[in-house]
């Protein structure tokens, strides 16, 4: 007898309780039915007998149509909160004593019943993944139904515990990986689409490609996040040669650089639970160990949003750009600007400096870089290393980022320091080349730019 | 490259930070040093950079001597609670609005900082197990330092999430199991000691023995709990033939009964986080599937505490026992009572009925059976099936339980109903044989016993 | 450290010696160079030092062009035979004594040096597979260079030992199988082409498909042979619904029949080394165990060669068919005969009986069925169970087998008896339905057919 | 469903046929019964139907008592040879043509039927191991029944193919290895006994011990050979500190030497099929890769037979030793010579030089070193590096080898050259220290010693 077999068996036993619900009159399942099932879960003792009830509830939820799901979430948020009187009593006791035990009781009184419910739903086989999917449904409603934020906070609180870095398992993805996992890699690749299995095979070419993913033991085959790496001689400037079906592979031993060219989050339902920074740093360590010859750990990253920012600057009244620069960028309005080398040459002289400025100087409300990719890598302790003009000439690349690709450089010994300066002072560490570009950008800006 | 290799590598990288602390002047590490390290963990951003800090803190804790550990726990409890003013403000806002979002903010305000600290300590490789060991230290101080209860509640709150049934992995333990795990089975067996590897080998004899354990992915080789099963013809009455080095094994296919004769919790630090009931029920399912010929799923369980309860009744003034019975039990004061078949015969006539009474009628403050083993199995939905006189003639068995062994019977179809009657009404389901015994016990009791 | 890692390492060490050969003057590698390397292998001591030499020789062979390979084989056959004088002496000693030890010496004297060479080439990592590929090259030359038969006999002798059933490992192929193996399944499928990964996914649909393959530990990922099975309700008559991209899957538990619809040998170089019969019988056992509800183990097999046999009978002077039948079959000469239901109806009345006759009565020189597929399954102990008209309406199916598909039925309890009757008397066991058809065929044949 | 599960199932199916034989009249099974079963195996077609017959035959063999086994072997040798007339005819055809095809036919005619029988017995699950055990029985009879040599040659011929290096799998043995394998390591350790599991645990201490074994896929858990390695600072001179229960472990990274201190063949039935040399060389490669800091790969080997050789020289008339030396060695006759440091000091002055002489100069009939351990390592390409006086002070060590331990040094770059000089000229490569000792030995020898 064998364990995966046992687990399968176990899940098959509980599956009786996990069959989709149907109503005899053919009408859609009503959210109140599922709410009732959830109440039973809470009334059970949270032990073995709860497993089947949890399975039934999750199956019930999955049988709801979209409208009923909305009602279900509302009901959960409204009716499974906490007991106000118990809270008030507990607060008074705490207020009086300021004691630790009273704090504990207050904490317990304040915990919404929803959290206990979610913990119990998690008892059943497959429960964790079902809850991740449930939060995906929830997130998609959040902007229209802001009252569900409290429920999302409960999910978030528990997922942070459950998907703690200590519980994640790193696995290398390659051509020996089960097809069931690989098809998910194809599906979830978010940065540079994988067309088909042949394309995937090339992306996983063991000679000069690496791919790593985090998995969580309780959700099996489903990757949480993965990163694709190209092993190259020199830091790459352009993405097309890397994605090229006919690229000439090199031997891993001959590479001096590892270029991270795609990081894809796989589970929408885990939004906000951070893995990416752990993943990159662990992968840097793996690669250093496997290939001691590697010198550079660098990304080849897109600049999403740069085009729309620049277009805005070109058009709005209080533009940061001076008029001459706006005139110089006019060629961008031609649909085929990127095909004329003279045009691209002259545009590049404007755009590379402006991109350096945009990535390091333009901040959001919280004083962090406006560009999300920059925020991610700089926050992880990387350096803004190089701005590559026409690094991505795909339609998508030209559209979002004017064809720019950026190298963020991870210098193992500097990561912590960079990270600290970034988090404490918002300091963006730049290479001298980027600093040069930024200096050049000044002459394109009205007055002296914000420093 | 291979993953366990990678994980090893990863852990070796972080091990730098996990070296035991030493002070240059040779004095013991001071708890304030570790508290400072913990504060840094909380001040970090909880992401990748926190991993090393978490490793350092745990290493620091492990370098403390017993006294410093006590001080560390006190400090943690006192200084890492919550901000009273923030709580008060949050309560007022909630009290006014009774809104869900205000509840959420109040809940967050009430969460002791200790919980976030523990979550972050868990980021490091091996963190989960280190925290389980830390709680073991904590539990051993709880009776003398009751003020630490709040800290224990934090551990308990998080462990309940982290060791959710959905995250546990069932594995069969047999002679093909790595020695590193088997040596732990030897060490942790709590019910009937395993003397050495030869003894273990017999306990795992694939012909008529089974052993299953729960593991948690994040603590690797360390079993959480395991159960030993003997496959027998007929329900066994006595433990010695099962433990006998020279027992004649039968073929698993010929067995009609599966006797659970030892359930051992392995991690003191997980006290109160329940697994046993899940384990038994899942193992029943596995065994039914593997061996469809099995009819009875039964325990062969000790009756710890029965001797001390009976001795008390024999001696105290307001004994439940009538005088004749007390006189009849006098032979128990002879050290060799169990070697004389006449004596044991006459004692048995008293003891079996009294044991049936004890197990089902004598309750603790919460109205549940006084006997902990009975509480566990009856609470799981088992039936009190048979009381076996001289079922365990080892010194330990005679000492704690007067040599009694009890069969609790798990009837798959009745488990839920029994469990429910037990939890709602405290109803102890007994076989007719046990009911007979209990009836017979009445004549040994003063007046009419509590029913 | 981990073993597959070690094995990889080991192979990488020996890979130095396994680099392709190049000549400094750019001319193709000459077969005499490789022959020299082979001689060094034989002159070595056959122990550790031979590993590198073996690797070099195999690399040298792989660097030969097609013409040089032919010369290499000729040279191997001619120059690595045995010493005639040693044979003569050994025979004389044996002839005189008829002793067992003399026989042993004679046997050793007669063993061609090639066999020892092949055994030593097999020492190197990857040697076994390299030799399988080498025999593939050899087999392709055999009809034009019949003198190589002796060399092929050496391969065959050794492969029979090396690929002994006792060394093969059965593995289930499903969507959890590594992609590296699955792509080979796509490539090697010989019966009903697998178009792409989507097609494969459907073929491996766990609900009502099974696939099993034999592997040999020394050639890793390369399957030797695999069989595809459809789980169905009732024995299937037609292959298109099984291959249909949109087939409605059933639950495995609801199936009463397992239909083997494709058996593909993967390694041309192992031609004549039989696995298929072992595979089918073992898979029948696996399926019975997994799905006790299965009643029928049956193939859905093509009838390759039937069309050419029938066309020959329609055209040749001494046809077995009477004139009326030949006239009745004339419609086959229309290219679209299969699209007209009237035509197919009337053709079927002729063709089903004639196919039953063809499969069971028409024999080759050795008295066995002329049809190779029939020979395989009947030789394995199956029964000729049903002839399905228009069971395969693909171009290929219509072309080779006039669209017929046949069910051969494996009745576990009859397999051995059927097999024995077949091997001793050439008896073809038929269902009563097939016997009926065969009887009907008589009226289409000139005179009384051979019985 | 899972494969090891399937394999198990398969073996359970064939186990029906593999039950021990019993005779109804209670008399022992007669060898002729098993011979008959073997004949049926040969008369079967060698395909699937033979599997059950093979299983029955092997079960029958295992049911024979020792005497019947002897008769069985005799019968097999005498009656399953080859057909003399077919051989004669084939020889005549070959003699006339000297053709390759005729050679092939002669080779086939000469192959004893026994070989085909053994190949077919190998079809059944577990057949390979059963045959290894059968040869073990055979080898134990060979000296008394020399006529069985022909049968042994058949086993040897097939085993050489089946246990080809290319089929072996190297595995590291450590504390994570299944107990089922570890107990075999305890049982098979032949050089320095492993007392119990605690002793084993220390031998496998991951900090400064390594252990590797060869396995064959078809015989599962049974190791073929294993080697134990100590990682040390400096080449060790003495074995006791290595075996010491309380040895102070060092970190693997700090070691500069890997000392092979025990190589144990596990399967008597594979005597003469060489693995040891492959194992050592592969392990050297593994260790170099894992621990680049290792400089010396060296053995710490016993000198079995030295004491008996020296005693013979001390006593026989034509001793190699001069009288003064014989007198100087007289102290060896005291039972406690090794406890007196003065005695051991003076004895050492004689014995170290004489041991160097013995190991490198004293040869057997084939001109190779008389000492088997020296023959093994020197034949593998090692250098005779150092002779350690009182390197093994155990009773066994003092008894066989006068307490000497020898370091044979494997210098990766010299292995092939040393091996070649040894095999071609019998050259024993010695360190300068050993050459010095050997020179000193001259003055203890009568006249000029054999060079």
Image (cartoon, coloured by chain):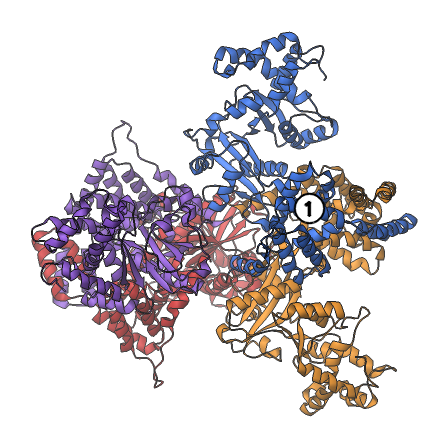
Chain colours: A blue, B orange, C purple, D red
Give percent across and percent down for residue A385: 60, 23
Give percent across and percent down for residue B409: 63, 74
Q: Is residue C375 visible?
A: yes
The subunit letter for the residue under badge 1 reads A
Q: Secondary structure at mark 1?
A: helix
Position of residue B79 relative to residue B221, above or below, is above
Q: Is residue A430 left or right of residue B156?
A: left
Q: Quadrant of residue B304?
A: bottom right
Give the camera-side residue of A422 and C397.
C397
Few, some or many C-alpha atoms within 10 Å of disc 1 (few <14, some 14-19, many ≥20)?
some
Q: Residue furthest top?
A: A324
Q: Quadrant of residue C284?
A: bottom left
Give percent across and percent down for residue A29: 62, 52
Position of residue B298 relative to residue A245, above or below, is below
Q: Split into 4 quadrants, where in the image is the C terminus of chain A?
A: top right
Q: Is residue D101 left or right of residue B355?
A: left
| Residue designated by label 1 | A71
Q: Residue furthest bottom?
A: B342
Q: Number of callouts in the render?
A: 1
Q: Residue furthest right?
A: A96
Position of residue A292 relative to residue A115, above or below, is above
Give the camera-side residue of B159 and A113.
A113
Q: Is residue D221 visible?
A: no
Give the camera-side residue of C391 and B31.
C391
Q: Is residue D157 left or right of residue C214?
A: left
Give percent across and percent down for residue C34: 25, 39
């Amino acid at each position: 007898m064998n364990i995966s077999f046992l687990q399968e068996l176990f899940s098959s036993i509980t599956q009786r309780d996990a069959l989709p619900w149907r109503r005899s009159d053919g009408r859609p399942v009503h959210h109140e039915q599922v709410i009732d099932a959830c109440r039973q879960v809470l009334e059970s003792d949270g032990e073995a007998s709860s497993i089947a009830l949890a399975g039934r509830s999750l199956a019930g939820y999955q049988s709801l149509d979209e409208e009923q799901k909305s009602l279900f979430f509302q009901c959960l948020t409204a009716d499974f909160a906490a007991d106000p009187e118990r809270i008030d009593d507990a607060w008074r006791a705490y207020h009086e004593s300021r004691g630790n035990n009273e704090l504990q009781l207050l904490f317990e009184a304040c915990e919404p019943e929803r959290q206990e419910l979610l913990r119990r739903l998690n008892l059943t086989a497959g429960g964790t993944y079902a809850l991740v999917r449930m939060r995906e449904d929830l997130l998609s409603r959040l902007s229209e139904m802001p009252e569900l934020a409290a429920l999302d906070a409960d999910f978030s609180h528990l997922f942070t515990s459950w998907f703690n870095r200590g519980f994640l398992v790193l696995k290398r993805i390659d051509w020996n990986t089960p097809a069931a996992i690989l098809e998910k890699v194809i599906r979830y690749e978010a940065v540079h689409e994988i067309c088909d299995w042949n394309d995937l095979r090339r992306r996983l070419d063991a000679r000069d490609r690496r791919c790593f993913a985090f998995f969580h033991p309780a959700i099996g085959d489903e990757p949480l996040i993965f990163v694709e790496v190209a092993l190259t001689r020199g830091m790459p400037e352009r993405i097309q040669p890397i994605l090229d079906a006919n690229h000439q592979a090199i031997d891993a031993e001959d590479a001096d650089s590892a270029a991270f060219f795609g990081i894809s989050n796989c589970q929408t339902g885990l939004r906000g639970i951070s893995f990416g920074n752990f993943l990159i740093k662990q992968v840097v360590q793996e690669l250093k160990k496997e290939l001691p010859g590697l010198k550079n750990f660098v990304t080849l990253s897109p600049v999403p949003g740069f085009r729309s920012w620049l277009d805005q600057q070109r058009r709005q009244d209080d533009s940061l750009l001076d008029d001459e620069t706006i005139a110089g960028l006019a060629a961008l309005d031609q649909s085929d600007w990127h095909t004329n080398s003279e045009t691209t040459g002259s545009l590049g002289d404007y755009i590379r400096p402006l991109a350096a400025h945009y990535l390091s100087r333009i901040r959001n409300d919280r004083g962090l870089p406006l560009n999300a990719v920059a925020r991610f890598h700089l926050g992880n302790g990387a350096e803004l290393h190089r701005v590559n003009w026409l690094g991505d000439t795909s339609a998508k690349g030209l559209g979002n980022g004017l064809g720019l690709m950026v190298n963020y450089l991870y210098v193992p010994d500097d990561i912590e320091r960079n990270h600290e300066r970034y988090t404490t002072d918002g300091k963006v560490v730049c290479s001298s080349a980027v600093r040069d570009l930024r200096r050049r950008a000044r002459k394109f800006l009205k007055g002296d730019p914000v420093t």
